[in-house]
Amino acid sequence: MDQQRIKKTVRRFSDLIERSKDGRAYSDFKEGINNGLEIAKNTFEENVDKFLSPVSDEDPAVKVRSLQDRFNLIIDTIVVKEKPNYTQDHLDGIYNGFEKSKKLFGEFIKEFYNT
């Protein structure tokens, strides 16, 4: 896999996540959303090789759906344990951030594969 392509892809998704964060997260819930987005971003970076594959003859729409399903599965398997400094609102925000990251990934991957 081309290292430049990997770095560029990670940077583009990271930038999308960063733009989606709330810069004024003054509540536990909003801070949780930002944390959830950050966890999703890091998870993508750790698993980027699963989302970049050589050019194939597969229908782009099918490929996008497959990649979206793969990302959703990875995000859905993340378990966030309660920490002493996490309120229930913060935990709820993290899971809300996970859901938001799935939507952002969907937009990102569609654009990436131009479907």
Image: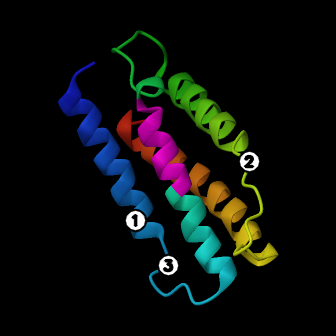
* 110 in the magenta segment: no
Mark 3 burial class by Cα count in 10 Å: few <14, some 14-19, many 20+: few
What is the image's colouring? Answer: rainbow
* Residue denoted by label 1: 18
Under circle 3, the secondary element is loop
Which mark, residue 79?
2
**12 with respect to 82 (left or right):** left
Q: Looking at the picture, does residue 87 appear above or below residue 82?
A: below
Quarter of the image for the N terminus: give it. top left
Nearer-the-camera pick, 65 or 17: 17
Q: What segment is highlighted magenta in the picture?
A: 39-48
Cα–Cα span, label 3 and label 1: 9 Å
Tell me the kind of residue under disc 1: Glu
Under circle 2, the secondary element is loop
Q: Residue furthest front?
A: 84
Instruction: Name the mark nearer the viewer: 2 or 1.
Output: 2
Considering the whole magenta stretch, tell me its main secondary structure.
helix
Tell me the kind of residue under disc 2: Val
Residue beneath the point at 58% across and 90% down: 26
Cα–Cα span, label 2 and label 3: 23 Å
Q: Earlier in the sequence, mark 2 or mark 3?
A: 3
Residue beneath the point at 47% across and 48% down: 42
